[in-house]
Amino acid sequence: MTWWRGAVGYEVYIRSFADSDGDGVGDLRGLHDRLDHLAWLGVDIVWITPFYPSPMHDHGYDVADYKGVDPVFGAMADLDAVVEKAHGLGLRVVVDLVPNHSSSEHRWFRESRSSRDNPYRDYYLWRDPAPDGGPPNNWVSHFGGLAWTLDETTGQYWCHLFLPEQPDLNWANEAVRAQFDDILRFWLDRGVDGFRIDVAHQLVKHPDLPDNPVADEPDDVEMGTTASIWETLEHRYDSDQPGTVEIYRRWRKVADPYDALLLGEVYLLEAEHFERYVRDDDGLNLAFWFTPLHVGWDVDLLRRALVDGAGFRRGGVAWVSGSHDRPRAVSRFGGGEVGRRRALVLSTLLFGMPGTPFLYQGEELGLPDGVITSEEAQDPIAVRTGELEHSRDVCRTPMPWTPGPGLGFTTAARAWLPFGNRVESDTVAVQRADESSTIHRYRRLVGLRRETADLHTEPVEWLTDEGPLIAYRRGGTIVAANCGAQAVALELPEGTWTIVFDTTAATESADAGRTLELAGHQAVVLRRG
Ligand code: NOJ
């Protein structure tokens, strides 16, 4: 049980990880052939983004069959081979479950929209138009525009918190719940070790679907055109509803006998909302705490995000500093050498926390965002709203494995998304050959996390609460980070402290003395004795 405690996870964005068949799109066989990289890095859990049959309006987060593999990613036998090889290497496999919405091409939705009295009608959220013929309420989509589209044939609107091609399932319907019990069992019987649950905080909606209160309507946000429209409403009725955790309680009854992990994408940035998902022993096992991903390089906000995340009672927090949905940490923190140093400092802080840290592919290389022009855009957010600044393409560019055309990612003349200006020193091969490269720092950090028992068990004691330093102690281990540009000093507690990890590598193995000196943007891990 709880094999994820003390483990390190790694997110594979399957389209961009490794392409085995030369069509320019990453696939399961490509992942299979590159699993050795993950074993070398030392991670324990591989989370694979959706590989199910899909029309790909949202690159797989629009699932047309929850029990299949899309031919672009391979066949079921390839998934089985990934699971078998991963297990042989000591890696656990977590697959992505997308229960908030299906694809509009899923058989359930095709049935559902065919007539008002179809047995599948109630699988989705259908409502009559408002008296003026407009949408039933004021809800908006995460991807810009309204959350309702009118079906001309049956005269009702369907609800979609994402694209119209991603209709929201009706979780008040017991038949939907039963379907997902069955889907969980299907994958668990194939040997997967758990699920990352997409949009885990939004499955349940208020039964009356009332208007959301208007939060703030900045003048420059025009209805219907921009992704920022999401921020104009307070999400009182379409998010974080009572009854959501009950779904995970039900799933735990399915998953626990398999000793499987339920890891939620709980996109709630305030501690008091997030906490209920990881509070009880029978809800989610882990949930991603995204607040560190949403603050810039601001030491007070970072400290707050860490203190909150460390305080959740059961410690069921999955820590991330990057994902396929957000700009990469190196770029968020200013880019270049400074951005790279800051990203490693943040990773060091996260890897010392209670819970389970995850890396996003390419983070171990210190990659900045890829450069993608508006003509090259693929992300539905960018395509739908025309706003490149919200595009997620920049963090989804293909993984650079080796120098040369195709970067070892593909043999195709073009990948599905351009490489985004990678250079030779960004590649896995070049970095692995250079002991001073970023990948070797991450490998050391992963190893340290695994081998340091204090980091799995001891409570967090904060050593600083202001200034550029963030430092905490867990038993005989201290993690200290200088988030500022100037050198600073930290008085160490009684005892002899040895530097066992240094983001700059310069001081590793040294005795820290009574006063630890840290250069600008440097973090270390110390061990007593
Ligand atoms: C969260 C996923 O991470 C994102 O990529 C996707 O677009 C939305 N959920 C909708 O499924």
Image: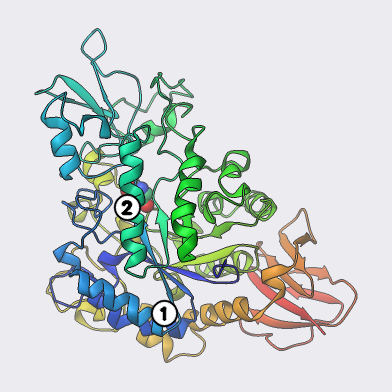
Residue 408 rendering spot, x and y as whole percentages: 25, 81
Q: Name the quadrant containing residue 188.
A: bottom left
- Is 297 on the left-hand or right-hand side of 252? right
Q: Residue furthest top?
A: 131
Q: Residue 22 carries which label?
A: none
Residue nearest the observer in this picture, 9 or 493 = 9
- Marks 2, 1: nearer the viewer: 2
Location of residue 165 with respect to 122 vertically, above or below: below
Residues 282 and 394: in front is 282
Label 2: which secondary element: helix
Residue 237: % across, % down: 45, 26
- Whether residue 292 is visible, yes or no, is yes
Q: Can residue 100 be seen in this view?
A: no
Foreground pick, 182 / 316: 182
The mark that comes first in sequence, 2 or 1, is 1
Q: Name the residue under label 1.
A: 38
Q: Residue at x 90, y 75 (%)?
A: 494
Outermost residue, right direction? 494
Image coordinates of residue 528 in percent, x first then y, are: 80, 80
197 relative to 375 in the view: left or right: right
Position of 287 with respect to 368 (left or right) is: right
Quadrant where the N terminus is found in the figure: bottom right
The type of residue carrying mark 2 is: Asp
Q: Which amino acid does label 1 sit on?
A: Leu
> Which residue position holds label 2?
182
Quadrant housing the C terminus: bottom right
